[in-house]
Amino acid sequence: LLEEKGVAGSYAVAAPQCHTRRGSTIRRWTSEHWREAVQQLSTRLPVVLVGAQPSPQLMKGLNNPHIVDLGGAGDLVQTAAIMGMARV
């Protein structure tokens, strides 16, 4: 999956669809916050987004070849491997 999207070498993983459990003090970030975070991170490393489905709201307006949305593209084993090989 990574090669197909042109990701080689070190990269970071972000999971914008992760939800906190009910009653958690951690807030769920908005798409704008995620967009800003991955934009900043992509200045240092390519960023691979993972999750159960794509993140079109996050990718909307981003024209950054260093951010790749693999949400929904792989099964659990592939996603775990992508996360395990990430630098960050």
Image (cartoon, grey):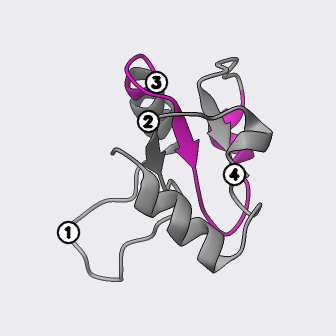
- Estimate the x, y position of residue 87 in percent, counting from the top left: 35, 44
Q: Would you place residue 86 above or below residue 67 in this image?
A: below
Q: Residue at x 52, y 71 (%)?
A: 80
Q: Quadrant of residue 40?
A: top left
Q: Would you place residue 32 above or below residue 73 in this image?
A: above
Pointer 3: residues within 10 angstroms few (<14), some, or many (20+)? some
Q: Which residues are magenta?
A: 41-60
- Estimate the x, y position of residue 71 in percent, counting from the top left: 68, 57
Label 3 vs label 1: CA separation? 28 Å
What residue sits right under mark 2 in the picture?
Answer: 10
What residue sits right under mark 1 in the picture?
Answer: 25
In the image, taking residue 37 as reference, residue 51 lies left or right, namely right
Label 2 vs label 3: CA separation? 11 Å
Task: Name the front one of labels 1 and 2.
Answer: 2
Q: Would you place residue 42 above or below residue 51 in this image?
A: above
From the viewer's side, name the closer residue of 88 and 29: 88
Element on which disc 2 rests: loop
Label 1 vs label 2: CA separation? 32 Å
Sequence order check: which comes first, mark 4 or mark 1? 1
